[in-house]
Amino acid sequence: MADSEQKDSRILLRVAVFSLLVNIGLVLVKFLLSVSTGSLSLKADAVHSFIDIFGSGALILGLIISRRKSSAFPYGLYKVENVVAVIISFLLFATAYEIMYQAVFAQSEIHAFSVWVLVLVAILVLVPFLFGRYEVRMGMKFNSPSLIADGKNFTADVLSSTVVFFGLLGQYLQFPVDRIAAVLVVILIVKAGWDIMVSGMRVLLDASIDHQTLDTIRSTIIRDPAVVDVKKISGRNSGRYVFVEADITLRTSSLEKAHTISERIEKEILKAVPNVDRTVIHYEPWHDSKIRYAVPLDDYKGTISSHFGEAPYFALVDIDSSGRSVERTEVIANPHQQVVKGKGLMVANFLLAFKPDIVATRENIAGRGPGYVFAEAGIETVQTDTGELGIFIQNVLITSVSPSVRTVS
């Protein structure tokens, strides 16, 4: 495990321990208040927090186990976090049942109490509210589903504690409303539990990751100049990590170059989606009759420029090699023509976005910066003595390598 992953895991475990301590404190305070006031709603809320202690314990256990890898579990035990999230959802359902039962069937025998009890209960509302927001924020930061689920569980605790507060306030003012409010809170708790359970079960059943993340990964892959097409891409969550698999077409038939390109793509995917644990790329060489040439021009008339980086324009010519015909021609402006230093590299990287197959120049750019950029992207470079774009295209159409075109390795 990388140092950064170990650091993240330690942070998540520390937050989970805080969750356990907060729940223990809430149980003790609520139980003492329920005894002193005789409030059934406080007693039910204490039961809620007591159940949460088991949830916090399961959260800690899940975070510890999910970090382990072995030959029996080569993909890790990340899904333990999702199992914990599902367990927490069932704890929420149990809490909802307890509150509903107390609200409908229990008889209230509240003792006389002072206004300070209301102050303490108000604090009990504030503590889980602040800690729950903190826990959800940390869970989203480190993409931990179990931590997010536990934070949402604290949100449910806020709702139930709010019901207790208004119930006691109503009793203090001789206007009891706690039963009605309890039913409303039960509905909210059940909804929160359902959302957590569905999210956890989707991961356990290997449902696809969200469309936004898939689109981010797809756009990252297709931006690589050596990639011609992304034929298929899929991904699944496992705990707070993502596993990605992609079938792509590359502009190279060399296995060594294809391996280098795939490693480069994996690094770019990790930059775009930091919680990707593993990327599997299946690549195949590109076979197409269409070839795109990029040629530097001095003007719109088609005069081929003697300088690559200083050319004011570039012609993009799509040629159907099987039918030996021109499918499309486009002239684009060079945005880096006036740059003083490094314009060759800038222009080369600019052309990569248009995905040419062959770059034809009058000067030899092999062994120079632009040539290295194109070679790394799997783009062929050729040198020509022809000064006119029209004549160059005619030579290309006549033969795959015309007498006036020399391939530069």
Image: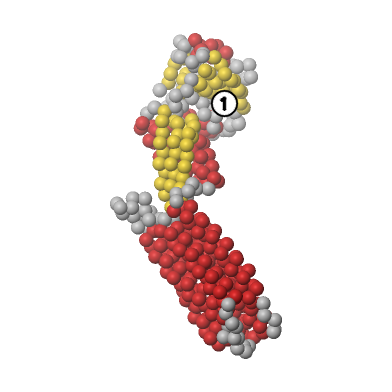
Where's residue 76, x and y in %? Answer: 37, 53
Residue type at mark 1?
A: Glu
Where's residue 34, x and y in %? Answer: 55, 83
> Is residue 383 visible from the viewing direction of this image?
yes
> What residue did someone put label 1 on?
310
* Residue at the spot 45% in from the left edge and 14% down from the top edge: 401
Q: Is residue 206 above or below residue 318?
A: below
Q: Is residue 135 above or below residue 254?
A: below
Between 4 and 308, the one lying in front of the other is 4
Between 229 and 168, the one lying in front of the other is 168
Where's residue 283, x and y in %? Answer: 41, 33
| Picture quadrant where residue 347 is located | top right
Neighbourhood count class around disc 1 (C-alpha, 10 Å): few under 14, some 14–19, many 20 upward: many
Q: Residue furthest bottom?
A: 112
Where's residue 124, x and y in %? Answer: 57, 76
* Residue at the spot 50% in from the left edge and 59% down from the top edge: 197
Q: Residue furthest left?
A: 71
Helix, strand or loop status at disc 1: loop
* Residue at the spot 47% in from the left edge and 55% down from the top edge: 201
* Residue at the spot 53% in from the left edge and 39% down from the top edge: 219
Location of the C terminus (image quadrant):
top left
Left or right of 112, for residue 197:
left
